Image: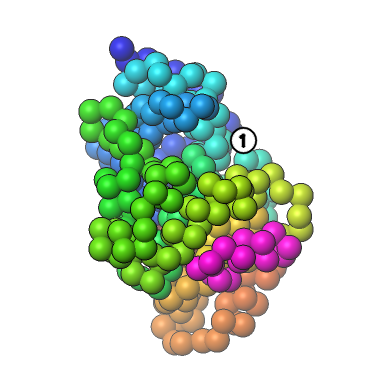
C-alpha cells in the first residue's frame, strides 16, 4: 500500500536545483524524471532488512515523498531525504559570499550549492571511486552494474545500492568481469571487507571532529583515493576547502575564464582563493552555471 509523506522546505530550496546540481542524480539507484520533476530514491530500514522505492517531487511549500509501501519507517525516510537533498545545510554564509562577487550572484537566486549525495557515505565512497580516471559513461555503467548485479530488489522497478556485505561477498574477478571495474576491482574488495570487519567506518566521516586536512588524510587511507577523490568526497561531507580539480573542471575554467588557453593549476587556485572555506563549492557552482540557465 502506497504511503505519502510531506517535508517542509527550507529557505532558498529548489528541488530541481538540489537534484540536478550534482551528477549523482544520473547514477542508480537515483532516477530523475525531468517531465514529472520527480526523483526516484531507494530507502533502507534502520535494521537493514527492508528496502523500498519512493519518488520525491515538489509540492509547493513542501517536498512530497510517495513510497511504494510502508516497510521503511517515516522517521528513516525523512532522515534520508533531508540528508540526500542537504535540506539541513545552512547555506546563508555561502550565499552571502556568492553575492559579494559579480559573477556568482546568481547562485543564491536559484538556490544552487546543495550537492546531491547518497543516503550513506559508503555509497558515496564507492561512487566517487567510480569517477576516477574514466569517462562519465563508464562511471554510469559501473554503478549500474553494481546496483543490478549486487543490489536488492526494492519494489517493481528499482534495486538498492549494494551493502558492504554484498560487495564483500564477491571477489576481484567478479568486479573485473561483471562490474567492468578494471583497476578498481581489488579496491572494491578491500574497501567492502574492511567496512564489514569494522576497520573502516565511512559513516563516521560525516560527523568527524577532525580538522579537514586530517580527515582528508584519513580518507586517503582508503585504497584508490588520492587528492581528487578525497576532495570530492569532502564536498559531500560539507567541507569545501579543496577544489577537487580534474580534467573536466580544468577545461571548463579555461573556457570560461582564460579565453580557451591552457593555464597552470595555481592560476585556478588563485582565482577561487578569495572564497575561503567555500572555494570548492564555488568552483563547482561557477563551472556548472549553464546547468541552471
Q: Which picture quadrant has residue 289?
A: bottom left
What span is colored magenta in the figure? 213-228
Task: Residue 272: give x, y in percent of width and height.
Answer: 63, 70
Is 283 a magenta residue?
Answer: no
Where 176 sits versus 13, above or below?
below
Is 225 a magenta residue?
Answer: yes
Task: Residue 138: give x, y in percent of width and height.
Answer: 29, 64
Q: Which picture quadrant has residue 75?
A: top right
The residue depicted at 36 percent of the width and 58 percent of the height is 171
The residue depicted at 43 percent of the width and 27 percent of the height is 49
Task: Residue 200: give x, y in percent of width and height.
Answer: 61, 52
As drawn, is 210 to the left or to the right of 110? right
The residue depicted at 44 percent of the width and 87 percent of the height is 261
Which of the two residues, 180 or 206, is positioned nearer the viewer here? 180
Can see residue 30?
no
The quarter of the rendered structure image containing the N terminus is: top left
Where 139 sits versus 11, above or below?
below
Which residue was labeled with disc 1? 88
Can see residue 184?
yes
Amino acid at each position: 500500500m502506497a504511503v505519502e509523506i510531506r517535508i517542509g522546505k527550507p529557505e532558498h530550496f529548489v528541488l530541481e536545483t538540489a537534484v540536478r546540481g550534482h551528477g549523482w542524480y544520473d547514477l542508480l539507484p537515483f532516477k530523475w524524471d525531468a517531465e514529472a520533476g520527480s526523483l526516484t530514491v531507494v530507502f533502507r530500514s534502520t535494521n537493514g532488512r527492508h528496502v523500498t522505492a519512493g519518488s520525491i517531487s515538489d509540492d509547493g511549500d513542501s517536498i512530497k515523498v510517495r513510497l511504494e509501501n510502508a516497510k521503511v519507517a517515516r522517521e528513516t525516510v525523512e532522515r534520508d531525504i533531508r540528508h540526500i537533498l542537504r535540506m539541513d545545510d545552512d547555506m546563508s554564509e555561502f550565499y552571502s559570499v556568492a553575492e559579494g562577487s559579480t559573477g556568482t550572484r546568481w547562485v543564491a537566486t536559484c538556490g544552487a550549492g546543495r550537492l546531491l549525495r547518497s543516503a550513506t557515505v559508503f555509497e558515496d565512497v564507492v561512487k566517487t571511486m567510480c569517477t576516477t580516471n574514466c569517462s562519465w559513461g563508464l562511471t554510469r555503467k559501473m554503478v549500474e552494474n553494481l546496483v543490478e548485479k549486487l543490489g536488492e530488489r526494492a519494489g517493481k522497478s528499482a534495486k538498492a545500492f549494494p551493502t558492504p556485505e554484498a560487495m564483500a561477498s564477491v571477489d576481484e574477478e567478479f568486479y573485473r568481469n561483471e562490474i567492468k571495474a578494471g583497476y578498481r576491482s581489488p579496491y572494491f574488495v578491500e574497501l567492502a571487507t574492511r567496512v564489514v570487519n569494522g576497520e573502516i567506518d565511512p559513516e563516521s566521516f560525516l560527523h568527524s571532529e577532525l580538522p579537514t586536512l586530517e580527515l582528508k588524510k584519513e580518507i586517503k587511507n582508503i585504497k584508490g583515493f588520492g587528492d581528487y577523490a578525497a576532495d570530492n568526497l569532502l564536498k559531500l561531507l560539507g567541507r569545501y576547502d579543496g577544489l577537487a580539480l580534474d580534467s573536466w573542471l580544468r577545461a571548463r575554467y579555461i573556457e570560461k575564464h582564460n579565453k580557451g588557453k591552457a593555464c597552470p593549476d595555481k592560476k585556478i587556485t588563485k582565482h577561487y582563493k578569495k572564497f575561503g572555506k567555500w572555494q570548492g563549492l564555488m568552483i563547482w557552482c561557477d563551472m556548472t552555471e549553464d546547468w541552471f540557465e
